Image: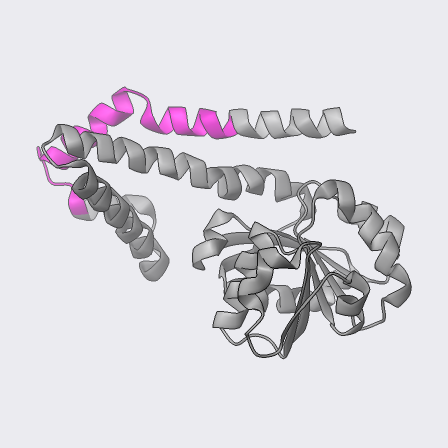
Amino acid sequence: MKIAIIGTGNLGKSIAKGLITNNAITSLYLTKRNLEGISDFKDYKNVVLTKNNMEAVINSDILIFAVQPAHFENILQEIKPKLHEKHVIISTITGFLISKIENILGENQFIIRAMPNTAIAVGKSMTCLCSNKQGEKRIKIAEAIFNRLGHSISIPENQMQAATVVCASGIAFWMRLIRASTQAAIQLGFDAKEAQELAMYTSEGAANLLIQNGNHPEEEIDRVTTPKGCTIEGLNEMEHKGLSSSLIQGMVASFNKINTIKDEQI
């Protein structure tokens, strides 16, 4: 694939690393105003560093935009004359609607929005994708790219804000749960390093059980709990204290806040 990443900041660099590591490129153009920040990529085969967005667009078919929201519209206006019928536009810019991109580039462009999370840096992102009508014909390309960087799912655009809470903010929610498990392990006698290791890898194991077995969480819980045992005792105490309720209410509060921010921007 001939890919360009327009705006190679932290997210752009993470995407680039994943593409290079997985041999997913025929060529890869990385653009940034200060090339020193991406100098680590200069020795990779078929990777070109440039300050010139137009150069990247002309030599690529898939354009991944990871720029600051304030710069995105001007960049789209700049590159518009060089777009052709093969170009696929993939935007990672939060809150920049497909309709707004269409207003600039036209409805006939293949336009896709992608919302990865910070775990993309370690190849474990949960990335949500949506597209315009034309973009549906190229959504498999976006899935192929982001599945190399974790896992992807296609959803309607009107669910992207909810997905931001579940997947992007969700990283912070899970970090807090892991931190709480770490604190409990310390109280039970482990040192801080051991405690965090126990919490991290137990969390990873729990997720992988669901991913690989395809079971409902309660099925896996049933495998661990025994009558009058310590696990059910702990689970019931957590529920009495509102663990599930607090998590759900927190996520709903986060969703309400993101809607407020959108209304203020409008």
Q: Position of residue 151 (x, y in %)?
A: 49, 59
Residue at 67%, 27% in the rendered image? 261
Q: Position of residue 19 (x, y in %)?
A: 54, 68
Q: Is residue 67 visible?
A: yes
Q: Is residue 107 visible?
A: no
Q: Number of numbered discs present? A: 0
Q: Nearer the viewer, residue 211 or 86?
A: 86
**Dominant secondary structure (helix, strand or loop) of the stretch shown in magenta:** helix
| Left or right: residue 125 compared with residue 162 | left
Residue at 63%, 68% in the rendered image? 140
- Quarter of the rendering containing residue 239: top left
Magenta part of the chain: 224-252
- Quarter of the rendering containing residue 82: bottom right
| Left or right: residue 7 compared with residue 192 | right
Query: Going by the picture, which residue comes out furthest to the top?
Result: 241
Q: How is the image coloured?
A: one colour
